[in-house]
Amino acid sequence: MSLESTKFEKSQLRANALKDMKLIKSSEKLLYEKKLTEMNLSFLGSSQTIAGYYPINNELNILPLLQLLSSIGYQIALPCITEKKILDFRIWNMKKSLVKNRYKIHEPVDGILSIPEIVLVPGLLFDKSLHRLGYGGGFYDRTIQHFRQKDNTKFIGICYPAQIIPKLPRAEHDQKLDFLVNLDEI
């Protein structure tokens, strides 16, 4: 498959995924938020800092999970856009307010820079080979590549089960995740 046809197929998948995510019922969203807070957290190991995300565009709301993790002693970080188009992660005291960046995504402004042991990664679609399809900016691909060169950070995809498909189109720059949480298997 050529790069152009891969880009086209990805853009079609993005548009359809965004439409499909709008159709997820409120009751289903609440069910999966609850499952998140009840799942076995042993996969976090001895990690101390967990980076999450502030949900946008009907992404799975992981804020209750982040609140739980914070209450049991984990430091919580959120991604921040940088000029290098690689995400920085800043510690977020969940009581402090956030600001919207140029993409209208909430991020902490005054949190301490951190290198999390685990990053919970959003996306529009994921496949069983641990690839993800995001919004097309490449931020997470560049970030994963950057962190893998020097740190032992693990990147874990987290989404609604309907967002997991058998196979996504891939380009050379696409980075694999380390793990994918399937909430229907919990």
Image (cartoon, rainbow, N blue to C red):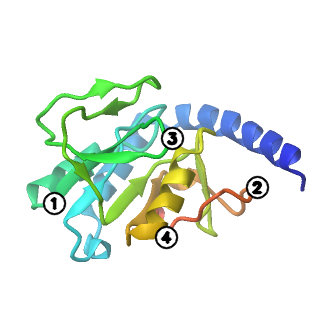
Place residue 42 in its image quadrant. bottom left
Marks 4 and 1: in contact by CB < 8 Å?
no
Residue 183 appearing in the image: no
What distance separates the C-alpha of mark 3 from that of mark 2?
22 Å
Marks 2 and 1: in contact by CB < 8 Å?
no
The amino acid sitting under disc 4 is Asp
Badge 3 or badge 2: first in the primary sequence: 3
Residue wearing tag 1: 74
Marks 3, 1: nearer the viewer: 3
Q: Secondary structure at mark 4?
A: loop
Is 181 placed left or right of 176 in the picture?
A: left
Q: Residue 57 placed where, x, y %? A: 48, 31
- Point out the image quarter for the N terminus: bottom right
Is 139 placed left or right of 147 in the picture?
A: right
Residue wearing tag 3: 85
Badge 3 or badge 1: first in the primary sequence: 1
The amino acid sitting under disc 2 is Pro
Residue wearing tag 2: 169
Residue wearing tag 4: 178
Badge 1 or badge 2: first in the primary sequence: 1
- Against 143, residue 181 (above or below) is below
